[in-house]
Image (cartoon, grey):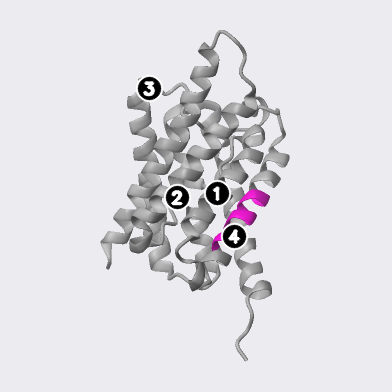
């Protein structure tokens, strides 16, 4: 068993959660303390780039060890696409969840509170006040696009040198759209970690941010495997 790749996934997911969710906490705190209003779009961009750049940083740090999934939905997509064993999938998901919990825990120490840690939500917990049904649909679609891109760009060896950058920028794009709706999950581990510390509404709603990304990832993998992949003659 190659333990190094599980350790890499732990580190990567912890970093993503700490920096991505941490940027959300920091941006919202700064906006709340500002004497003059700052457009919500500005904080959205800050958070979106924090998540995207975290992916870029980790892709070029641990990508050669584990592939830098740092997301159970991504691992599921790769499993369904036939590019990963069930054993590794289980190991990756366990490492990712523990990493997200560690990242959220460290963030709570940084801010000295568990009142908010960049958790996801719908209804009153959503900037747009969307319903659970719309939130589920948003997360499925966003994760579908994200995982489909990952499967596409990583299937072409000639793109290997820029894959991390492309994936990171795509995550920025996804967050720009998704933050006003759900805070953007597309990653069950990233959602579960903060929710466990925040509790309350965040924890009661986290099921959606576990289920919807997994559905979106599975559909993306099936489309990639049976529709977009050319069969060898």
Magenta segment: 140-150
Location of residue 198 in the rendering, given as x and y in whole percent from the top left corner: 46, 27
- When asked about the image quadrant of residue 87, the answer is bottom left
**Helix, strand or loop for disc 1:** helix
Location of the N terminus by quadrant is: bottom left
Residue on which disc 1 sits: 169
Report crowding for label 4: few under 14, some 14 to 19, many 20 or more residues within 10 A (C-alpha): some
Q: Which mark sits nearer the N-terminus, 3 or 1? A: 3
Between 190 and 229, the residue placed more toward the observer is 229
Tag 1 near tag 2, CB within 8 Å: yes
Residue on which disc 3 sits: 111
Report crowding for label 3: few under 14, some 14 to 19, many 20 or more residues within 10 A (C-alpha): some
Is any atom of residue 2 visible in this view?
yes
Between 201 and 32, the residue placed more toward the observer is 32
Q: Which mark sits nearer the N-terminus, 2 or 3? A: 2
Q: Which mark sits nearer the N-terminus, 4 or 2? A: 2
- Which label lies toward us, 1 or 4? 1
Location of residue 93 in the rendering, given as x and y in whole percent from the top left corner: 42, 55
**Helix, strand or loop for disc 4:** helix
Residue 226 is inside the magenta segment: no
Q: Residue at x 34, y 53 (%)?
A: 61
Residue on which disc 2 sits: 56
Residue on which disc 4 sits: 149
Disc 3 to disc 1, C-alpha distance: 27 Å
Q: Residue at x 61, y 45 (%)?
A: 173
């Amino acid at each position: 068993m190659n333990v190094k790749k599980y350790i890499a996934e732990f580190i990567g997911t912890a970093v993503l959660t700490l920096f991505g969710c941490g940027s959300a906490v920091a941006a919202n705190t700064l906006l709340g303390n500002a004497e003059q209003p700052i457009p919500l779009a500005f904080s959205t961009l800050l958070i979106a780039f924090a998540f995207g750049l975290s992916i870029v940083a980790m892709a070029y740090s641990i990508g050669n060890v584990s592939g830098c999934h740092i997301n159970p939905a991504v691992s599921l997509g790769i499993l369904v696409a036939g590019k990963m064993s069930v054993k590794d999938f289980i190991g990756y998901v366990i490492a990712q969840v523990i990493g997200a919990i560690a990242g959220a825990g460290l963030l709570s120490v940084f801010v000295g509170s568990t009142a908010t840690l960049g958790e996801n939500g719908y209804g009153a917990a959503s900037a747009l006040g969307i319903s659970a049904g719309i939130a589920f649909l948003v997360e499925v679609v966003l994760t579908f696009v994200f995982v489909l891109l990952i499967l596409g760009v990583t299937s072409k060896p000639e793109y290997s040198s820029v894959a991390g950058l492309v994936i990171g920028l795509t995550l920025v794009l996804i967050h720009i759209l998704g933050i006003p709706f759900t805070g953007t999950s597309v990653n069950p581990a990233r959602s579960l970690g903060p929710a466990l510390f925040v509790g309350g509404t965040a924890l009661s709603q986290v099921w959606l941010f576990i289920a919807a990304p997994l559905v979106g990832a599975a559909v993306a993998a099936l489309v990639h495997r049976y529709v977009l992949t050319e069969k060898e003659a």
